[in-house]
Image (cartoon, helix red, strand yellow):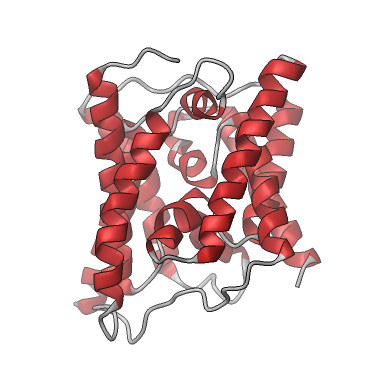
Amino acid sequence: MVELTSSDFFLAAFGGILIGISAILMLYFIGRIAGICGITFSLLDSNEINKPWRWVFLLGLILGPLLVHQIYKLPIPDAPTDNIPLLILAGLITGFGTKLSNGCTSGHGVCGIARFSSRSLVATITFMLFGFVSVYALKHLVGL
Amino acid sequence: MKTLFSYLIILLAGLLFGIGLAISGMNDTHVVQGFLDVFGQWDSRLVFVMLAALIVTILTFPLILKRQRPIFDLSFHLPKFNQIDKKLVIGSSMFGIGWGLVGYCPGPAIASISYGYWQTAVFIVSMLIGAFICNKTTS
């Protein structure tokens, strides 16, 4: 186990609450699911490009961390792996897979489960399990 | 005026989502891989993030969905399809593998753009290409 301080736990729970409030705002005011894949990948769809609200949400998503790291002097996370083939492979299957299953951690994991959607529950359990398997294979079998 | 106000709400929602990811450590691929590494140095933070978010949404979504419509639209835009099919299971499995390999899911990848790492850019471009290929090859 990684040793964590009480402030780590507090920030994790507080961050989760903010994500939940974001999902409430989206559903209550504009009737949409705060699913990042849905919002982002619809921009690739020519019928959806003229919907500026998606860009506005993504702008907030990008500016939020910028602000919070500046204001609270929160340390910037370390860079992800610099293994280029791994980054490309992971990106490709994440994009393909979340498009195919219509959602990721936010859409299925946070919003879908709260709507008691059985599809979202199955999706969340599946990507968690395969996430465990993937990291096990990567760290303990391949040793990357 | 109504449109302006709705855009402000959407911007606020995006900001809160991004701030939530940043302060909870979820933009750090090593924290996320630490959570997925159940046989190694397990990092439990993601559990707290997800549970906290879920408590908030589970308590409020049923109340919101009892309404006839959202404030700024004529109806709710919810997925109508509710069958558990092969696409759902295969897609989520692929996503889970990709998630583990780098430690990014789509939200944190986009929320990490301002950190300026080239790795994030490579991941996001590949992810968009993956979604585009899926769009073109499956109906």
Q: In this view, does A42 lie to the left or right of B59?
A: right
Between residue B105 and residue A54, name the one nearer to us.
B105
Residue B115 coordinates in the image, percent (x, y)? 44, 29
Instruction: Name the quarter where the N terminus of chain B is drawn.
Output: bottom left
Between residue B124 and residue A142, name the one nearer to us.
A142
At horizontal 71% and vertical 45% (from top left) the residue drawn is A92
Q: In which quarter of the image is residue A48?
A: bottom right
Q: Is residue A79 left or right of residue A73?
A: right
Between residue B89 and residue B95, name the one nearer to us.
B89
Q: Up-down: is A44 above or below B116?
A: below
At horizontal 72% and vertical 14% (from top left) the residue drawn is A143
Q: How many labels does the image show?
A: 0
Residue B11 in view here: no
Q: Quadrant of residue B74?
A: bottom left
Residue B37 in view here: yes
Q: Up-down: is A83 above or below A13?
A: above
Residue B139 coordinates in the image, percent (x, y)? 75, 73
Residue A46 coordinates in the image, percent (x, y)? 62, 72
Q: In which quarter of the image is residue A128?
A: top right
Q: Up-down: is A139 above or below A47?
A: above
Q: Is residue A51 left or right of residue A23?
A: right
At horizontal 56% and vertical 16% (from top left) the residue drawn is B40
At horizontal 76% and vertical 18% (from top left) the residue drawn is A142
Between residue A110 and residue A56, name the one nearer to us.
A110
> Looking at this rendering, what residue extends furthest in the right direction?
B137
Residue A106 coordinates in the image, percent (x, y)? 45, 52
